[in-house]
Amino acid sequence: MSNQLTHRGLPAGMTRWDLLKMIESGRRVLGLSKGAVAYLRFAITHTMDIDYEPGRICAFWHGVTSIVDDPQISCDRRQISRIEVELEEKQYIRKSCTPHSRRTGLRKNDVIKYEYGINLAPLIERVQELQVAARKASFEQYDVVRLRGQIRKLFSDIRALGNEDALDIATQILPNRRPSTVNSYEHLKEIAEALEAVFNDFCVEDSMGEMSHQSDISPTPITKEKKKKKTCTPKEPEGEYELQTTPQMATLLASERLREHIQFYASGRGAANNPDWRSIELATQERAHEHDIKTQTWQYMCSQLGNRRTALCLIIADRNAERTDRGKVRDVAKAFEGLGKKCARDQAILGSLYGELVRHIEEAKNAR
């Protein structure tokens, strides 16, 4: 009897290379070894785009010897066999063979008619799980940078207290005082929380000590009013909407796809119903990647405008791509870069564009 295990296909717009990228990004979250990822890379490379369409068979029937001979696979026969067992146990592949323990199949007019080998249908059926794992891994990757910076600052703050006991306890938490040597995301979170608790505890002790000392030697209060110096506060340019924008307003303004990213990152930070700016910044960076905006471009804009304004630039360009009037953006990457250059010269431009987009959305709602 022929093996004809089919699948429901990849989501619209997703390619097999997108599938591979999610596997590579979410490897640690998925609990896959580097060898398993290399094996799946070989598997996806030796299939065809048509195999990932709904109702198709997606498989390959290379023997273990052929897989070992591939220059990108640095494993021996035993390791390959163990990897196949690992992937089958985790339900990412299904193995089969003929009664004579051979791997074979038939591809006619580019379509697989049957196969006895390695079927990738279980992997394709779990694409949503792979998406979640890739996003979680991406969130952790960006948040690791923040946590390491937070830990360094906490060590500096604890040192500034001038309390040797506090510094000793902090050093016990991270003996070398170097967060860059810690690769585990969960461990970094634990270290940051522990150091913050140390800092808060000793801050309370020091403030209590200072108050009791000052109560004995408090000077006579000065009743003479000091002359107030007149200062000129520069007026904010009109249209600075982005300075008054809350994370909730920015989320409502975002495109549907971007809102999904924001909700994901917010849930990862324990604020699913109340996104913060950090979640929005991470989500917009991921959306920028989807629009093929280079990482160097994103980082440059952040250095020029700040993270929040850069995120708002992406939100505006991304949402304008959904418009049907003359304000429609056809190339989000070019619109994003152009908006960044204009805002670097005059930041009021961002506010005016933001306000115009808000009015457009309101008008579109009223027209329904």
Image (spheres, rainbow, N blue to C red):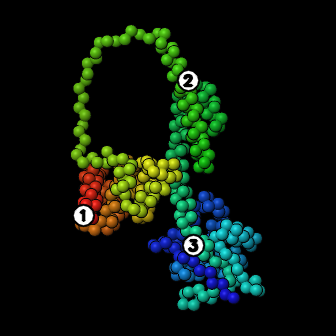
Say what amino acid the circle numbered 3 marks: Ile
Say what amino acid the circle numbered 2 marks: Glu
Q: Quadrant of residue 28?
A: bottom right
Number of the front mark, 2 or 1: 1
Q: Which mark is drawn over residue 88?
A: none
Instruction: State if disc 2 and disc 3 touch (CB < 8 Å).
Output: no
So how many labels did they put on this image?
A: 3
Q: Residue at x 60, y 41 (%)?
A: 191
Q: Which residue is mark 3?
A: 124
Q: Residue at x 64, y 60 (%)?
A: 31
Q: Is residue 211 left or right of residue 222?
A: right
Label 3 sits on a secondary structure element that is helix
In this rendered view, identify the residue nearer to me: 350 or 323.
323
Separation of residues labelled 3 and 1 (CA atoms): 41 Å
Q: Residue at x 47, y 12 (%)?
A: 215
Q: Which residue is mark 1?
A: 367
Is residue 28 placed above or below 241 in the rendered structure?
A: below
Q: Quadrant of residue 154?
A: top right
The answer to whether one can see residue 110 in this image is yes
* Percent of width and height locating residue 356: 25, 56
Label 2 sits on a secondary structure element that is helix
In this rendered view, identify the residue nearer to me: 48 or 98.
98
* Percent of width and height locating residue 367: 24, 63
Q: Which residue is mark 2?
A: 205
